Amino acid sequence: MANIAAQRIQREFREVIKSEEVAKCHIKLELKNDEYTELKGEIAGPPDTPYDGGVFQLDIIIPETYPFNPPKVKFITKIWHPNISSVTGAICLDILKDQWAAAMTLRTVLLSLQALLSAAEPDDPQDAVVARQYKEQQSVFRQTAKHWTYIYAKGPHREAELEAKVSQLRGMGFEEHKARVALSTCDWNIQRATDHLIS
Amino acid sequence: MEGDKTLATSASTKAVEEESLAALNMDEAILSQRRGIEEQIASEQQYLVSSTRELSELERDYQHHGEFSARIQELKLIYGCLRRTRADGNCFYRAFGFSVFEALRKNKAAYQAFRKSITEAKEYLVIIGYPTFTLEDFYENFIEELDKVCDGEGCPISQLEELFNDKGMSNYLVVFLRLITSSQLQKEQDFFINFIDGYSTVKEFCSQEIEPMDKESDHVQMNALTSATGVCMRVFCMERGQYSTVTFPSDGKPIIHLLYRPGHFDILYPSADATADSPTL
């Protein structure tokens, strides 16, 4: 069994390396060990989304029963998205769960994740806080996602106003990431974010 | 006033966070429960496809359901023995694959026709845009094993049993049979859409019910796989109050026989010459 998985990943790896998407720097795949059981993926944030210009890294674990069962994939790069946990990076995507099919590949997975960044599904959320903001305050959501992309994914678009609010909370002695999470969670209301951090 | 409101919003944010965490734990719990069930089935059923067994063995499955013993007597009038398959959701494809390989091994003409049909089914998937990289891999593997089984005088039955009980190899064959089924459903979608409940397109049905492993099969899958491959199959459907037999296609001469009990398929051998090695076809 494990042998089937390793052989398959070996071949997939070669396929991805020479693919058009790699040439255009849209996706990337790297081996983390010689057994082909752990890989690092990378996807570029799609244009016309708050993730534009960002680079998102993924942790990919190949189960022994691959390709009959899906790879285990999560975001290493922190991201603000309704279908991705802002805490753990866990992803809610059907093909990584019960709709995986053995004819799919890691390339399919990377491209599907990229598509997920373009089209969130807030009614099937992984992160309920983000999903609620996405549905109720779309513009706040977009700013927040763009800010997270700038901070964690080397994105090019700065959100000066949000950065100032993070600095303000840091000035009050809160740790930077915690402050950012609290502010993002509380729709950038400083008072509520402070209460949230204290409670 | 203002403070109260802030507190209330903060509490509701907490509630959403907790809900989110609970959903995550729920996913984990479902996954671990599923793994538990799989392990239990695997420990009770060591085989993926068993050796041939007496039909009377079925009586043990129904110790507390007397009405089934009448069904088993009816079954015995037609069939001599059975092979069980593991109840892992892939039983239809595995039972189909095993009995087709077994039947084709001594039937050169049917073997060539089958080989041609599955090649066409694969080609159709290429046309509608399936990734050739993996598709060709499953296809080539399937053809290679089929050729090994049917080459010359046909391989010994023990080799076939070994092939279908090697989990990796066996699942490779199942994946390809799922793809052929999907190919046929999509090719004849105007027809099949009438028999699919709960899905707006045949494509959606295929990606949720056919192509993922461990998804169970029913009438639609039986119809699609037999028509794609040109294999004539008779199914003995055993239910509490009655039995019925269905042949796909209805005017054909069956070369394989399956036993269907709601949610599960096993392999049957007609009784006229019911030895394992040469069932009457």
Image (cartoon, coloured by chain):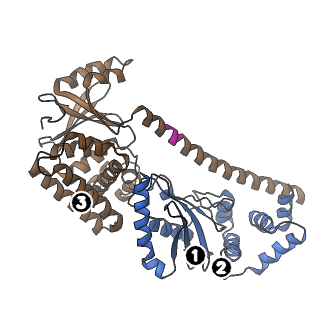
Chain colours: A blue, B brown
| Chain letter for the residue marked with disc 1 in the picture | A
Q: Marks 2/1: CA distance?
A: 9 Å
Residue B142: percent from the left, percent from the top?
A: 26, 55
Along the horizontal axis of the image, is B20 left or right of B51? right
Q: Secondary structure at mark 2?
A: loop
| Chain letter for the residue marked with disc 3 in the picture | B
Q: Residues within 10 Å of mark 2 (few under 14, many from 20)?
A: many
Three-letter code for the amino acid on which mark 1 is drawn? Gly
Along the horizontal axis of the image, is B107 left or right of B74? left
Discs 3 and 1 share one subunit = no
Residue B191 versus residue A42 in the image, above or below: above
Picture quadrant where residue A12 is located: bottom left
Discs 2 and 1 share one subunit = yes
Taking the view exactly as shown, the residue that stands out farthest to the front is A34
Question: Looking at the figure, which quarter contains the N terminus of chain B?
Answer: bottom right
Residue A39 vs residue B71, the one in the foreground: A39
The residue located at (84%, 74%) in the rendering is A167
Residue B206: percent from the left, percent from the top?
A: 36, 55
Picture quadrant where residue B233 is located: top left
Q: Which residue is mark 3?
A: B121
Q: Marks 3/1: CA distance?
A: 37 Å
Q: Are marks 3 and 1 in contact (CB under 8 Å)?
A: no
Q: Is residue B102 visible?
A: yes
Q: Which residue is mark 1?
A: A45
Q: Secondary structure at mark 3?
A: helix
Q: Residue A136 got which mark? A: none
Residue A29: percent from the left, percent from the top?
A: 51, 71
| Chain letter for the residue marked with disc 2 in the picture | A
